[in-house]
Image: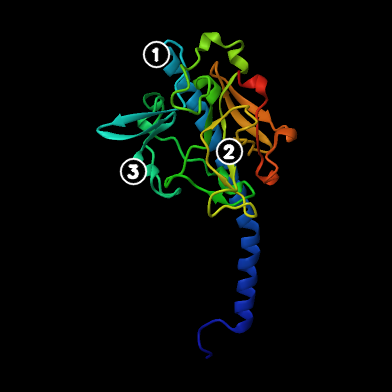
Amino acid sequence: MRDKGFTLLELLVTLTIVLVLAGVTVPAVWGAYKTTSLAVSAGNIRQLAAGASAYLGDHNYTFWPYRATGEIQGVRGTVWWFGFESFQSMAKPEGERTVDMECGPLGPYLPLNMAPDPSFRFAGKPFKPKYRRGYIGVGYNVLLAGNKGWLPSSGPPLRYWNLENPGKTVVFATSAQINSFQKPASISNPMIEEFYGFDDDPKQLPSVHFRHHGHAMVAYANGSAGLVPMDEMKMDRRAPEAQVGRLPSELLR
């Protein structure tokens, strides 16, 4: 009787079968993961749209600031539109920072299970995270937050009733930015990173992410949602494969 075990031929045959199966299943699993990421983007946009509508109803139909300095339970920090970040967190390297989404303006109007968007992994460039647990992958139209909404003291936010066409005014959009100026990113190694807002100012870097087959997911001021295709003339040319650009100005005001 021969010893129990695989012969060299049997090992080669087994290895071949495993490789064939891997070649079939890995692309399928990866495709399913990409589909799941699209669903996460859509879910986040819908939840933000619903939360924004509820917030407006409770606040005299006035939009919220993009950011402000504030204090939560004795801790000072920045109140972003999407949550509270302590000054201690902001002093940490990017990728190690934390944010409490429950303490932002929309916190009471959003579910606790909003998921970080995994779509950045498919953006065609290395991903440079800002937060330890990831971010929801959506930006806010800062033009609704005041005259120069990026700044904490930029003037009062706009009111819903002052919008000419709420059904065509984008409040939220899938968002990201190309970073070529902050390590480990560089001009020769641009990376894609999370970002929180967008406008139509040519002096600002483009920050709308058309990551779903060349489209950005958006939520409008009237609570509806949809897809907007990229205008290649507004694309960030530092990393065209990442599909970061701008929305048309007529959708922002």
Quickly name the residue at label 1: 58
From this view, report whether residue 15 is shown above or below residue 106.
Answer: below
Label 2 sits on a secondary structure element that is helix
Task: Identify the residue at image location x=53%, y=25%.
Answer: 142
Which amino acid type is shown beneath numbered disc 2? Leu
Crowding at dot 3, Cα within 10 Å, few <14 / some 14-19 / many 20+, comes out as few
Which amino acid type is shown beneath numbered disc 3? Gln
From this view, report whether residue 60 is shown above or below residue 141.
Answer: above
Is 29 on the left-hand or right-hand side of 104? right
Q: Are marks 2 and 3 in contact (CB under 8 Å)?
A: no
Crowding at dot 2, Cα within 10 Å, few <14 / some 14-19 / many 20+, comes out as some
Crowding at dot 1, Cα within 10 Å, few <14 / some 14-19 / many 20+, comes out as few
- Horizontal and vertical percent position of residue 123: 62, 46
- Nearer the camera: disc 2 or disc 3: 3
From this view, report whether residue 217 is shown above or below residue 21.
Answer: above
Task: Identify the residue at image location x=54%, y=9%.
Answer: 162
* Label ID, residue 147: none
Quickly name the residue at label 3: 88
* Label ID, residue 38: 2
- Horizontal and vertical percent position of residue 25: 61, 56
Is 153 on the left-hand or right-hand side of 194? left
Is 121 on the left-hand or right-hand side of 60? right
- Nearer the camera: disc 1 or disc 3: 3
Which amino acid type is shown beneath numbered disc 1? Asp
Label 1 sits on a secondary structure element that is helix
- Horizontal and vertical percent position of residue 228: 66, 28
Give the mark, 2 or 3, whose residue is nearer the N terminus: 2
- Horizontal and vertical percent position of residue 247: 65, 28
Query: Marks 1 and 2, how far apart in space?
Result: 31 Å
